[in-house]
Amino acid sequence: MRTWSLLGATLFALLAGCEGADDGAGDGTPLDAAPDSAVESDAGADSDAGGDAAAEDGSENEASADGESEASTEDAASDDAPDSETGPEASASDAGCKNATLCALADEQRAADRMEALVNDPDPTALPQFLTAVPKGGDLHMHLSGAIYAETYMEWARAETLAGTTKYCINNSSLALATSCSSGVSPVPSPGDALFDQVVRAWSMKDFVPGAETGHDHFFATFGKYGAISGSAHHDDCLADVMERAESENQIYLEPMLFSNSTASSKGSDVWQGGTLTTAALPGFHAALLADAGWPASVNAILNDIQKAETGARQILGCGGSNPSPACRVQFRFMVYISRSGGGPGVFAQMVAAFEAAKVEPRLVALNLVGPEDGTAALNAYDRQMEMLGYLHGAYAGSSPLHISLHAGELAPKYMPSGYTISGVNHIRKAVQIAHAERIGHGVDVLGETDPDALLAEMKQRDVMVEIGLSSNIQILEVSGDAHPLGRYIQEEIPVALMTDDQGVSRSSMAGEYYRAVMAQGLDYKQLKKLARTSLHKSFAQGQSLFTSIDSLKSVPECSPTVATTYGDPPTPACKLFLDASPRASLQWELERRFREFEAAQ
Ligand SMILES: [Zn+2]
């Protein structure tokens, strides 16, 4: 952990404390950005850098060697670094360092020193600018609808109303977007209108001050208020928007939670007529769903949404034209999301549809359960939902590549309903042990679960990764600073990466998450870099990881550093073959290339 000076701590307090970085009251970082500035910012865009990252199609790759490389960066940094077959030591010696890895390490240290100095810089924009430009890898936990800023949704609504395609208005009492506009409504406001700021505050955490309404409740209430425009019809617009935002922050990969499958939910309710759906009944119900004549529509609903979202987003960004947006090089895979509070048959049918769709759609990589974990219906359904996933994990082993990533442990004692406790429900443990979740979203309550030391040890042993949402955790759960388990996860060597969750609602950005990680969690540059690397190493992009160990940075042998080259340099022919066969490794190599470029410029 990095320690910062009194000046740095004071600066942090000046920048963030008054807005409640530690009290759950709201926006909190100087990187909170209105959508236009976020999209149009060119800070850190690296817009002329390497647009040839991974291929899009991404069939599963098993082609590379499975042994560990003996030539990690640590090895290459030693005097015994292997001779390069591809060239002399020109670049290394020119730079005054002994080999390519040592040169890279020197650049890295310079970047680390620079960031440390910026923490104490009297200019409050200096560190945010640095963190915007830092290469960040991927965002593995983002709700597509919650990622869009209120201003952007209103802009779309005004444009469609003007064009006559859909008439939108604002309900005067709830401030929700509506399409039924006969009475008690106002036109969708424009910037400068009195109603505009009210709507922004209702649809997000902007200026939120807890009172009669908690941050928890205000946050979750936002989704329904702009729900009229955040559905499938606008997934292409939403995807294009988050791709532009990612590009502006030097991110190269996204795994949005895209689609909620009402077709499958209805089918589940129709097909199941047996009362309470028990675990023992799952195999029979599963077979009945697949045998139902109308079932294919449930799978096709997912396939169609993915196809439409990507095709539309690429069209919006001009990706097929002569002047494509730089955002076109941001890559993505998708998750299906399922509401925790739905009825059992509908939830199970949505899970089945996701496993089936992933058999034929490589862009669909995972499913996730969403909605407040501390809702009574969600708490009561949790164990059965874990058992459903446990059953499907076994039933589809070897036949569907769908991964399981679950919000789990997004809980705080103060928001648990009467009669429930963190150690009584043990959500993370059940997600890992019963549902076989490979990644956990939030994991905030880990130290409150039964026998947390054993749980942490099991997560490490299973290599379960935790997606960390610092802004979200402050705003929804009021958990931050030392009360947040990020430091403990790092201490226990459990893989972690930062994520934005709902950056439109939070008024945040990935750079803002990095800022919180530095200022409120005390992370240093090298720790941030490890988080960025972890975000791609633990992504669900297809193919073998470049690294066999993120801790030691050992790579597959094809791509091991040499005297003249290290990660991110033009790859050797053998390494290029490996990268071409693995979309995930190709993304990782591009991240390393961006790190080399960024650090060399510090
Ligand atoms: Zn989430």
Image (tube, grey):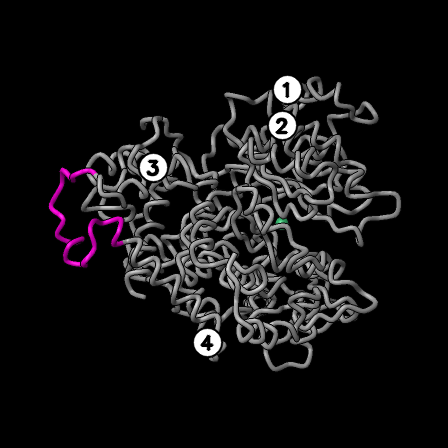
Q: Is residue 515 left or right of residue 481?
A: left
Q: Is residue 258 visible?
A: no
Disc 3/disc 2 C-alpha distance (Å): 44 Å
User: Could you say where residue 339 lies in the image, as x and y percent from the top left?
Assistant: 69, 43
Secondary element at image label 2: loop
Q: Which mark is residue 81?
A: none
Q: Which residue is mark 3?
A: 555
Q: Is residue 89 visible?
A: yes
**1 or 3: mark nearer the eye:** 3
- Three-letter amino acid code at disc 3? Ser
- Please, which residue is most extreme toward the front here? 79
Secondary element at image label 1: helix
Q: Earlier in the sequence, mark 2 or mark 4?
A: 4
Depth order, front residue of 61/456: 456
Q: Earlier in the sequence, mark 4 or mark 1?
A: 4
Q: Earlier in the sequence, mark 3 or mark 4?
A: 4
Q: Earlier in the sequence, mark 1 or mark 3?
A: 1
Disc 4/disc 1 C-alpha distance (Å): 65 Å
Region rendered in magenta: 82-103
The crowding category of the residue bearing disc 1, from other C-alpha atoms within 10 Å (few below 14, some 14 to 19, many at least 20), is: few
Q: Earlier in the sequence, mark 3 or mark 2?
A: 2
Secondary element at image label 3: strand
Q: Which residue is mark 2?
A: 295
Asked if the residue under mark 1 is in contact with the one under mark 4, i.e. CB atoms within 8 Å, the reply is: no
Q: Which residue is mark 1?
A: 291
Quadrant the C terminus occupies: bottom left
Q: Which residue is mark 4?
A: 121
Residue drawn at 56 percent across, 46 percent down = 491
User: Could you say where residue 126 lies in the image, as x and y percent from the top left?
Assistant: 44, 74
Asked if the residue under mark 4 is in contact with the one under mark 3, i.e. CB atoms within 8 Å, the reply is: no
**4 or 1: mark nearer the eye:** 4
